[in-house]
Image (spheres, helix red, strand yellow):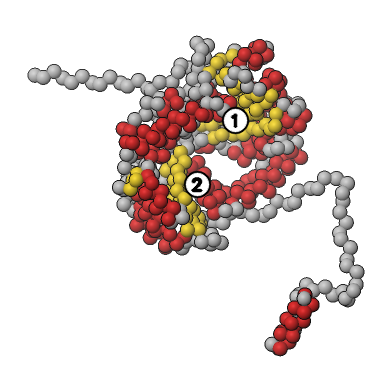
Amino acid sequence: MRRAAILFFTLALAACGGAPAAPADAPTSLPGAPPAPPAAVDRTGLPTPAAAPDWQPPAVSTWTMPNGITVWYLKQDQAPLLSLRLVLPRGAATDPRGKAGLTALTADMLDEGAAGKSALELNEAFQRLATDYGVSPATDGVIVAADLLADTLEPSLALVADVLLRPDFPAEEFERRKTQHLARALAAEADPGGTATVVLRRVLFGHGYGSRPAGGVRSTLSDLTLADVKAQYAAVFKPKGATLVAVGAVQPHTLKGALDKALGGWTGAPSATPRVVHKALPAPGIYLADFPGNTQSSVTVARIVPGVDATEDYFASEVFNRTLGGAFTSRLNLNLREDKGYTYGARAGFNRWRQAGFYGLSASVKADTTKASIEEMLGELRRVTGEKPLTTQERDEAVGGMLLGFPGRFERMASVAGQLASLALDGRDPDWYRQWPEKVKAVRAEDAQAAANRYAQPVERFVIVVAGDRAALEPSLKTLGLPILPYDAQGNPISEKAPAAQEAPAAKKPAAKKPAAQ
């Protein structure tokens, strides 16, 4: 049958005026000649990585709407889709003391009824348009997302505008969503890893900026009221200073017209201000959250570092971290996992917000290796600034790995929109990623070592947070010579030894007395 088909197409082509031309790279060997032998492969060693691609993201176009929204536009027409991300410049850092989670609950309430439509009606309207809507609160902002078909831009934007500009905040939906947030917070308290992060933020940042997760904890969620939500909405959800990222198959004039129609009447500037950064350094110690009977411990060793706004050695610090704990082949993971067998994986990394951040090493380890794991983490920090500094080979492997993984961040429209939204959240320029590959390549081994010296020492600046079985761990942890300071799963100290009292709303100033009537 195959031969008959070939004969049929050959005759058909001949009838149309001739046989097809041979491709330019057609082999010149005679029929029946043996094929060329394959290139020799050296199998005596491990394969080497391919060369890093010379690639950078395409340029982003920008303009500013009259109401203060800056638009970042990138056309990608490989599919008839559009990804939108609206980044508002105020976030969970503006939650009043004792009310962590307020911005998250407010954002969650936006689509629980708006412009006279119920939550179910809004959901059905988005589904009919095949539009995915979502909202994500962060420390420094709120990201409103919509992924849609390009030809439904106007009706989809109209729905998003209803949610943003005209929320109804129905009382019954508030009670339902608050109950769900409380239930989620309660469930999170059963996770040692999540609890370790909650405790760490409270220990490092006290009652100030960055001290609580965006979603809050039970003790800060329980007293939130609908009036709190309405006040936070009025203070946070304003257009001035916001950035709208648009990536997809839409022409600029079409996008401009749709944005002006849907959001042009939205005005105002946010009045909420972030909490003040807690300046005092945490007391040295082992901050322990008790998980009775746990066979594993979640261990974190961390210290305060400058935030995005004050970080001048970002690229050097990332190269240093990739060698120490940012990759599977890092020193930390090869030590704790491959050599010692204490854990399935150990990692290190920077967590930076605009005004502050922390650098931490963490792992979930077998309970009976908790003390040894802490000693190895501290040992890696000492070695990288002492007897075992970073090598040129480690620098080359770190830079190569970062460059090889870079294009993967931009595989889908939604991924591209998310990457750009993260830049807006951090206050960076839209072309920052276009400069990223060259700035990574420019990091020298001595630059990475200088970053190691800055962030990995002195080891005494690092606090130790452990979430595990206190009864089983305490005897061995005491031998480390540090005070053990118990905390609960909501990040509150439960001992007089701890340096901070349980969080409560900030005291209100007494109202001024009215003058007596004359």
Element under disc 1: strand
Element under disc 2: helix
At horizontal 63% and vertical 46% (from top left) the residue drawn is 439
Question: Within 10 angstroms of label 2, few (less than 14), some, or many (20 or more) residues?
Answer: many
**Which amino acid, mark 2?**
Ala
**Which amino acid, mark 1?**
Tyr
Q: In the rendered image, which residue does mark 2 sit on?
A: 421
Return the x and y of residue 464 as percentages of the image width and height. 61, 21
Say above or below: 498 vs 208. above
Q: Which quadrant holds the N terminus?
A: bottom right
At horizontal 48% and vertical 32% (from top left) the residue drawn is 184
Return the x and y of residue 483 as percentages of the image width and height. 59, 12
In this view, the residue in front, 127 or 97, is 127
In this view, the residue in front, 320 or 145, is 145
Mark before the other along the chain sequence, 1 or 2: 1
In this view, the residue in front, 309 or 148, is 148
Label disc, if present, on residue 359 of the rendered structure: 1
